[in-house]
Amino acid sequence: MSSTENIVDPHHDTLRGPRFWVGPIVVVAALMAALAYLYLGSMISPADHLRKFPMAIVNQDVGDVMPGSDARRNLGDEITAGILDGIDPERIDMQPMGISAMNSGLDNGTLYGAIVIPSDFTKRTSILAQASVVPGDIEKPIITVYTNPRTGTFGTNITQTIANQAMATVNATIGEQLTRTVEDTLATSAPDLQLSGGSRITLADPINVLTVPHKPLPDNTGAGLSAFYYTLLLILAGFTGGMIVNTMVDQALGFQPAEYGPRFIARETTHLSRMRVLLIKWGIMFVVAMIVSALYLWIGTALGMPFPRALLMWEYGTLAITAVGVTALAVVSIFGQAGLLVNLLLFIVLGLPSSGGTVPLEAMPPLFDWLSTFEPMHQMYIATRAILYFDGRGAAGLAHGVWMTLLGLAIGLVLGAVITMIYDKRGFHRRHDVPEVSAPIGG
């Protein structure tokens, strides 16, 4: 009897079982469904999910006497009260404050925009009403809407929408009051005079609303998206780089075979503990982080991207890539090949939509706001944005981002070290199980 007649393919029954075919299909379909829900659900209807969107209203008006009355009025106070009464405080957090606090909030990125009523608003409105029946040139009273382009294009658009709606109401209310005041004054003091059509149009729309960006971004910042994409690069360098380091080290040490085209190479497994192998991978990852962070700066500068705090950006980039890479390697060391799926969920699937880099978290469903409290990408985004757009201010998110990145690095180091040492002590060594093959009887 030939020895080959006694060899049974151990995978023959596996191929026939439904689990072999259904497993990959279910995992991939579930992952893609999660991607679709999270990515589309985070951005398709921001107006429906607006929640505590932070803006400021600054009233500097000192008031004046309006035509037809001896009493002083302060239209700025009336407009401020009207705007605050007309908005839902659960959706828009319109905060009355002074000009200094407003500038600080815009500089730190804690405000998406502001409405500023100047000190001479009532006076200019009074002059406009008087000039409606007197020949001569006149300027409309001005209200300025400040946007904050450094918080992103989406945040700017939401700010403009809110301000436009508020100013349309204010214009209509003030216009109606002015028209009625002038008509009443004319009826009393000059009944033979009538408002011209041009005057009526001017009084019906009396306020000149100016939209001004607060500290516009320089060129080559992608309209405020460069910080988000730079953060994405840091995440990918840590996550993808960690997986590449893991595979190449395991192949070189014989823990898994290597394939290069038709070549299949299975090296002899080295007798290194899990902990020693993980330390080797962490060391390589740190060197990779320093080099890749420098490469990002060099390539970005060559493309014209501004780096006002280049050294700080390199330092934080190195920290961020190291933290993600160390944690990703720890997860794979703990869960094995299933760790790739865990890393994908942690750093990419849940991280991208909750980063706040494209759509403000205040315009997303509460789920994403909750995810942002611990998801690495959001912490890295606010730190990167602070460095690139807000001069590296700690209050702009750098302090929080660095602290959370260090915390993530510490968690990765502790979990990876503790679990792999437990595996080593319990004898879960990484060895190939080679089954014993006995010669067939009569072979």
Image (cartoon, helix red, strand yellow):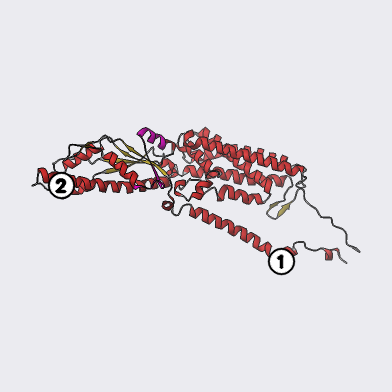
Determine the secondary structure under disc 2.
helix
- Mark 1 or 2: in front is 2
Residue 104 part of the magenta segment? yes
Discs 1, 2 touching: Cβ within 8 Å: no
Q: Residue at x 31, y 42 (%)?
A: 81
Question: Pointer 1: what residue?
Answer: 16
Q: Which amino acid, by three-letter code, is at mark 2?
A: Glu
> Can see residue 3?
yes
**Magenta span of residues:** 86-106
Q: Residue at x 29, y 48 (%)?
A: 169
Image quadrant holding the C terminus, namely bottom right
Viewer-side residue, 170 vs 379: 170
- Tell which residue pokes out farthest to the front in this image: 71
Tag count: 2
Residue 402 x, y percent position in the rendering: 54, 36
Q: Position of residue 435 (x, y in %)?
A: 81, 55
In the rendered structure, which disc, 1 or 2, sits on the residue that comes first in sequence? 1
Q: Is residue 50 left or right of residue 194?
A: right
Alpha-carbon span between mark 1 and mark 2 = 91 Å
Specify whether 93 is left or right of 265. left
Left-right relation of 156 to 64: right
Structural crowding at the residue carrying mark 1, measured as other residues with C-alpha within 10 Å and reported as few (<14), some (14–19) or many (≥20)? few
Seen at 88% across and 62% down, the residue is: 440
| Residue 274 seen from this side | no
Secondary structure beneath disc 1? helix
| Residue 183: mark in rendering | 2
Furthest residue in direction left, as rendered: 192
